[in-house]
Image (cartoon, rainbow, N blue to C red):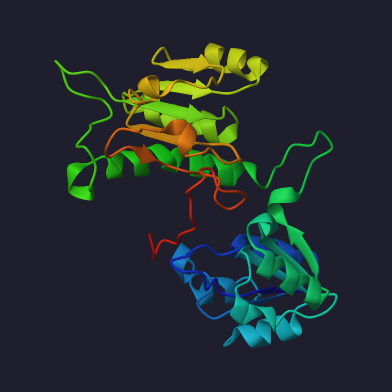
Amino acid sequence: MIIGVPKEIKANENRVALLPVGAQTLKAHGHSVIVEKGAGVGSGFSDESYRKVGSEIVETPKEVYSRAEMIMKVKEPLDSEYGLIRKGQVVFAYFHFASSRELTEAMMKSKCVAIAYETVQRADRSLPLLIPMSEVAGRMAPQEGAKYLERTMGGRGVLLAGVPGTEPADVAIIGGGVVGMNAAKIASGLGARVTILDNNLYQLRYLDDVMPKNVVTMMPVILPNEEMAKSPPEILPASPGSQTTTSHSPLRPFFIVTGATMASSAPWESSRPTTAARN
């Protein structure tokens, strides 16, 4: 099979779908690998590192798509790539079809074989290709939230750990799955007081056993407005499904919501998709 690796073109997307070692493995099993020039540079892999393992470097994405029987990407194709995908071509990517009707219809029109990494399941229904992405998202969320709590970034000037003589910040995490668990590890490690909310009591029992003492678990409840006014400075929606802004009002000024599920569904009623170039 001829396998093609185009360069990612989404704003500030520096990852590459196939490392040189992966290309070497495919080559050893009799496949051919075509890599677009510069595809691995953002991840620290030169074109020469692919050539050394037997890959062919080509100049344009058009050449990759026209010759390859299977395309390996990281992020979903953008509109400039729709016309390059042909009938019967296998395309692997994190598609997240639920978030884009335009993308879904474009792939249906192309009649390609679109395989979304995030939906690949094992026999036990676990998602082996989504889990590492969820781990990354969960561990980055408290880091990003802490950044935007800084006064210079428009926040309240809250330090998650606090200092001697002051209280640490409170962080609420909605959802105790892979994203939420990893978010809790980082937030608690930074010294915050963390509350994980989940409607699965069995998962809460597990988290109660494995998390440090500054993490508590809680079944979600609807609080009256006067209680929500005491809400923590940072909330991390770590599971799909919208939270309504009205049910969480009034929120305190400079309140930070760090969402980790925009690719599949908006975590907040007022959420909107952004990129690393447009916040």
88 is higher (above) or lower (below) than 13: below
Q: Which residue: 72% across, 57% down? A: 116
- Where residue 30 sits, quadrant-wise, is bottom right
- Foreground of the two, 183 or 155: 155
Residue 134, how many percent across, how many down?
57, 42
Residue 187, how many percent across, how many down?
38, 29
Residue 119, how many percent across, how many down?
74, 49
Q: Which residue: 50% across, 58% down? A: 273
172 is higher (above) or lower (below) than 118: above
Q: Quadrant of the C terminus?
A: bottom left
How many numbered dots are placed on residues in this image?
0
Q: Which residue: 40% across, 24% down? A: 225
Instruction: Classify residue 176 as left or right of residue 111.
Output: left
Q: Does the rendering let one see residue 56?
A: no
- Foreground of the two, 204 or 73: 204
Residue 47, how many percent across, how many down?
52, 76
